[in-house]
Amino acid sequence: MFIPKFSRRLLLLKAAVGTAAVVFLLVFTNIFIVLPAFERNMMNDKKMQVENVTNIVVKMLDGLEKDAQAGRISEEEAKAQAFSYIKSIRYGRSHDDYFWVFDDIHKKILLHPRLKDGKIMDAKDMLGPAGDTVILKILDSVKGKDDGYIRYTWFSKRDDGGSEQKLSYNKRFKPWGWVVGTGIYIDDVRNELAAMNAKIFHFIVVIIVAIAVMFLLLFIVAKRSENEIYLTRRALSESNVILEASIEGAPDAFLVAFNDGRISHYNSNFVSMWGVEADELEKINFDQLKQIIDSKISGSVTFQNDSSEFKVALNDGRRIEIRSRPLIVLQEFVGKVWQFRDVTSSELAKKEREILLKSLSEKNDELASIMFIASHDLRSPIINIEGFSGELLGICKETSALMNGIDIPEAQRLALNAKMEEVHECISFINSGTSKIDSLLRSLLKVCRVGASVLEPVKIDMNEMVSSILKTHNYQIKQNNVKVTIKELLPCFGDRSQINQVFSNLIDNALKYIDKDRQSEIRISSSDSEDMVIYCIRDNGVGINEKYQSKIFEIFHRLSLNNDIQGEGIGLTLVKRIVKRHTGNVWVENNPDGGCSFYVSLPKDKVALNLSSDSLNS
């Protein structure tokens, strides 16, 4: 669509004003809303941090006091251990934040970084940078309560003689009359906030630069729009020429016919294929053309106007494949595009394909045999691992019993027992891993046996078979209160044992993956489709994500990672292999109201099975 120059400029102006407003709001929000909120949250986080570490220290003091009360240590030893522990604590980003301990009863300083080791000082003697009795103010902050905050000026932690604002948290330890506290420097929080503000500012600058670049590009695009419109129109004209040339140069014959019978386009291949002169095509309609084509088709077959794809054999021996596509103009069906392809040469390649397919089948049988032997032989070392793991476990138990009869220090006994428990745990992991490998190998053998077994196809009463399968799952059905509905099922033709495996696996999956939030239902039905019967197992369970529907038939691919659901991920793989051996197909579709439907197509009789087998081999 062409936009006048004035309209383009107005559009650019509106976009520029709107973007400027957005940038202003972004800056305003950052300065007056975001940063203050960050500061409050950061200060709250810091306060929570000092509260947590102080509570840990007080909890340690409580433990030492209980040990002293129980007589395990003296009170002097408990206090000495407490001083040693608290003195060693350093935390914070630079590990330079510390704790102090005051005697609230006698107003003494028992532990402080500015106090020499082992020394005790009166609280009134330790003055702050302004000469005030800061320690007495700290003690007053917890007067009449268990804890409290106080904000004051203290010496800078950079030891440069300066002072900084500090916020301290103090907590009373009543049994000993102590007050334990620590604090944070306000400037640390502000410095972190300043660093964050700098990053946000840089981010805003990047956004503004990006917007400026975008407007520059938009201006350039607007300036070039008229030239691009011209180039687009020219390219469209060239595309029409190229399209007509492509149709003319295509190896197939093409014809365009409208609903009113007009023949609008065709190529030279159509003229040569049907022996109709171009002058004659200009004079006749599509119905007359069909009569000409019918006269060249052998037998009683005629041109099928309503089919989208069919084949015909001509009197001269050629075989022509005919396809049609609807011609839609402004969402209205106005005609059809017909494509005619000479497939005579492809028929000559059938025998060669049969030879190649036979060779491929032999290779597949050889590969299946190798997989079977490898899977079978791999189970021998697994059995050895399980056996020796059991013996090793017995040796560990005997060793533990022998250690209990030996007089060794208690600490060493505990250490040895801990090591033996680790050995037991390692052995259990080994057994778990070997069991998993053994299960996978058994599953692989089961898949191999499906391909190697000889089919014994018979006519199967599916109503009887499905009813029998449901009886084996009767416990699961009753336990989960599942409503099962079976419509009258059409019979099919196949190997009874393998078809039973197919429907057992599909019904089992439907019962495994139910939706526990609603009444579970399973519906089993069938329908006739030419020489095949299509069976549908429909459920209202959890369903299958569409992006995984192409992968669920792969070996060892599970529908769910929930460990409560049993299985190794071969059920649907077996289903697909068995159905393919019966020349059928299996697929899954999600239901609009939840859950999914598995569809299985199987031959309806022996003739259909043989015809499908011939088609696959060809």
Image (tube, rainbow, N blue to C red):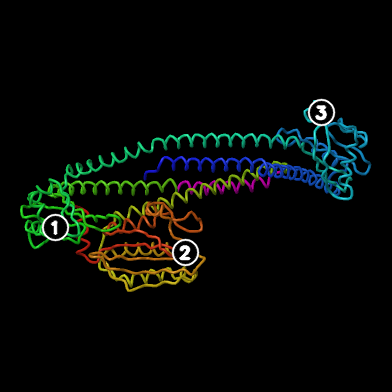
CA gap, disc 3 and disc 2: 71 Å
Q: Which residue is mark 3?
A: 162
Q: Residue at x 27, y 64 (%)?
A: 494
By secondary structure, the bulk of the magenta-drawn segment is best described as helix
- Front-most of 101 and 368? 101
Residue 99 lies, with reference to residue 560, above or below; the image says above
Mark 2–mark 1 Cα distance, whole angstroms, equals 56 Å
Describe the element under mark 3 as helix, strand or loop. Answer: loop
Characterize the local packing of mark 1: few (<14), some (14-19) or many (20 or more) Cα atoms within 10 angstroms: some
Q: Amino acid at mark 1?
A: Phe
Q: Nearer the viewer, residue 541 or 164?
A: 164
Viewer-nearest of discs 1 and 3: 1
**Residue under pointer 2:** 514
Q: Is residue 387 magenta?
A: yes
Q: Position of residue 150 (x, y in %)?
A: 83, 42
Residue 286: which disc? 1
Taking depth in this image into account, of 139 and 480 the one nearest to the observer is 139
The spot of residue 555 in percent (x, y) is 38, 51
> Which residue is farthest top?
160
